[in-house]
Image (cartoon, rainbow, N blue to C red):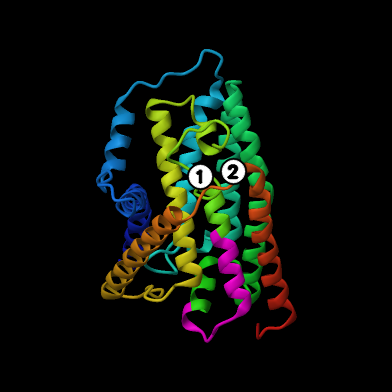
């Protein structure tokens, strides 16, 4: 009976992240529209857009290879698995043994690899520009992400997400300069990885500045739907990762009962909503930077993550 309950709980988390990803995107769009004194699209508009894309026929270029057709499904699968492994409303779930934070980084890197190859496969100029910019961002974003991982693993003595969550939530970690710097670095990486302002503007198609949109211009129909849901899952993933690592309060402990799971679910939804509102507020109050300044932006994230690891390694009290 306990094994069946664990399987159902793990399945619920996998379905939860998939169901909430478009809603989070809709919330961010709604908040940005209301701050600009516009009515904006409904919260459920992303679900309607995905259904419309799935029903449409996929138009594929004549010179596209099998990679162009397979990449959207590989991107969606890798991102969904990574998002499902992150603790949301409870830690210590059935697949928590495989929820290593380095594995999460590797899955995200795999999805990026497929996307950049797909952007160059057809041979358009926009796809090549977007892929080259995506790789440029990855060269600084991934090291910064790994330095954040090293900071937290030094503190928890493990790279397993459930162990880190339990250390951050149930032990006396206290306020540390290194954790604050790691949090800021992770936020900067999340903005860059999700092509959000100030790195990129997901609401426009300006050929001189776009990154993510340039790689998916040739996609349509169900292929574009897979990429869009993958992008929404990636945004949810990073927000869930920030919540799990730095704001794990309210999360149910391993083996907790139904009441603890419901409390953890409510706390997760509340924190997710607050994160979506803050993201919309941030993007409304700041302008997009030039593409040539993105390395400086990510370089600051890398330096802060490195200093966080160095401070924690030199002195356990910092």
Quadrant of image for the N terminus = bottom left
Structural crowding at the residue carrying mark 1, measured as other residues with C-alpha within 10 Å and reported as few (<14), some (14–19) or many (≥20): many
Asked whether the beta carbons under mark 1 and mark 2 sit within 8 Å of each other, the answer is: yes
Q: Nearer the viewer, residue 184 or 145?
A: 184
- Majority secondary structure of magenta residues: helix
Q: Is residue 148 highlighted in magenta?
A: no
Going from N to C along the chain, the mark reached first, 1 or 2, is 1
Pinpoint residue 260: horizontal percent, then vertical percent: 30, 75
Pinpoint residue 171: horizontal percent, then vertical percent: 51, 84
Q: Which residue is disc 1 drawn over?
A: 78
- Secondary-structure class at tag 2: helix
> Which labelled disc corresponds to residue 302?
none
Give the left or right position of residue 316, taking residue 168 as reference: right
Give the left or right position of residue 21, taking residue 51 as reference: right
Pinpoint residue 40: horizontal percent, then vertical percent: 28, 45
Q: Which residue is disc 2 drawn over?
A: 110
- Secondary-structure class at tag 1: helix
Report the Cα–Cα distance between label 1 and label 2: 7 Å
Magenta-tinted stretch: 169-187
Residue 30 seen: yes
99 shown above or below 224: below
Quadrant position of residue 280? bottom left
Q: Is residue 181 highlighted in magenta?
A: yes
Q: Residue at x 59, y 81 (%)?
A: 176
Structural crowding at the residue carrying mark 2, measured as other residues with C-alpha within 10 Å and reported as few (<14), some (14–19) or many (≥20): some
30 shown above or below 53: below
Quadrant of image for the C terminus = bottom right
Q: Nearer the viewer, residue 154 or 32?
A: 32
């Amino acid at each position: 009976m306990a094994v069946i309950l664990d399987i159902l709980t793990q399945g619920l988390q996998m379905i939860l992240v998939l169901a909430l990803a478009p809603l989070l995107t809709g919330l961010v769009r709604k908040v940005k529209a209301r701050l600009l004194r516009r009515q904006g699209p409904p919260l459920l508009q992303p679900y309607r857009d995905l259904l419309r894309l799935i029903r449409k026929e996929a138009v594929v270029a004549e010179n596209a290879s099998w990679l162009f057709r397979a990449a959207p499904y590989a991107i969606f699968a890798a991102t969904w698995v990574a998002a499902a492994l992150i603790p949301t409303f409870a830690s210590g779930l059935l697949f928590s043994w495989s929820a290593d934070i380095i594995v999460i980084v590797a899955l995200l890197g795999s999805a990026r690899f497929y996307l950049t190859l797909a952007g160059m496969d057809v041979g358009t100029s926009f796809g090549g520009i977007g892929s080259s910019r995506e790789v440029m961002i990855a060269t600084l974003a991934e090291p910064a992400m790994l330095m954040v991982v090293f900071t937290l693993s030094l503190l928890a003595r493990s790279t397993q997400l459930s162990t880190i969550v339990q250390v951050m939530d149930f032990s006396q970690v206290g306020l540390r300069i290194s954790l604050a710097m790691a949090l800021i670095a992770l936020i900067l990486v999340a903005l860059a990885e999700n092509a959000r302002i100030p790195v990129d503007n997901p609401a426009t198609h300006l050929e001189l500045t776009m990154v993510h949109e340039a790689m998916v211009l040739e996609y349509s129909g169900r292929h574009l739907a897979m990429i869009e849901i993958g992008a929404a899952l990636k945004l949810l993933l990073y927000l869930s990762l920030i919540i799990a690592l730095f704001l794990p309060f309210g999360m149910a402990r391993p083996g907790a009962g139904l009441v603890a799971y419901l409390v953890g679910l409510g706390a997760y939804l509340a924190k997710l909503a607050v994160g979506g509102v803050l993201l919309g507020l941030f993007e409304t109050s700041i302008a997009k930077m030039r593409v040539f300044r993105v390395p400086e932006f990510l370089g600051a994230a890398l330096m802060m993550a490195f200093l966080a690891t160095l401070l924690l390694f030199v002195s356990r009290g910092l």
